[in-house]
């Protein structure tokens, strides 16, 4: 299963974060306008729409294979 991750050293900390705006599953969370966003892995669907809009190209993805035991180790 694919999930988005943010590389903090690439994040520009944009005042209007497009990544937060475009995430339909509301997995990208920014608690304060001055803080960098973070990903709630439980809500992230792995669609990677965020990767297409991030100006700093901070969005990457991680792949966690499903073991078939019903749980993923995120």
Image (tube, grey):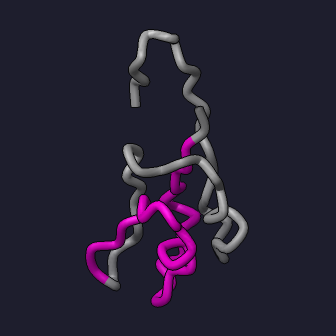
As drawn, is 16 to the left or to the right of 59? Answer: left
As drawn, is 57 to the left or to the right of 71? Answer: right
Q: Could you tell me how many numbered marks the image carries?
A: 0
Q: Residue at x 34, y 85 (%)?
A: 33
Q: Residue at x 59, y 38 (%)?
A: 62
Residue 20 in magenta stretch: yes
Image x and y of residue 63, in percent: 61, 32
Q: Residue at x 51, y 12 (%)?
A: 67
Q: Nearer the viewer, residue 9 or 57?
A: 57
Q: Residue at x 39, y 20 (%)?
A: 71
- Is residue 35 placed above or below 67 in the rendered structure? below
| The N terminus - image quarter | top right
Q: Which residues are magenta?
A: 3-32
| The C terminus - image quarter | top left
Q: Nearer the viewer, residue 71 or 34?
A: 71
Image x and y of residue 7, in percent: 54, 55
Q: Quadrant of residue 52?
A: bottom right
As drawn, is 26 to the left or to the right of 46? Answer: left
Residue at the left extreme? 31
Q: Nearer the viewer, residue 64 or 7?
A: 64
Q: Quadrant of residue 51?
A: bottom right
Q: Main secondary structure of the magenta part?
A: loop
Residue 60 in magenta stretch: no
Q: Quadrant of residue 10?
A: bottom right
Residue at the right extreme? 52
């Amino acid at each position: 299963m694919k999930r988005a991750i943010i590389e903090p050293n690439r994040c520009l900390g944009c005042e209007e974060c497009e990544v937060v705006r475009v995430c339909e599953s509301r997995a990208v969370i920014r608690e304060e306008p001055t803080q960098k966003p973070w990903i709630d892995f439980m809500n992230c669907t792995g669609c990677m729409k965020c990767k297409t809009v991030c100006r700093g190209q901070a969005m990457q993805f991680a792949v966690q294979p499903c073991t078939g035991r019903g749980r993923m180790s995120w």
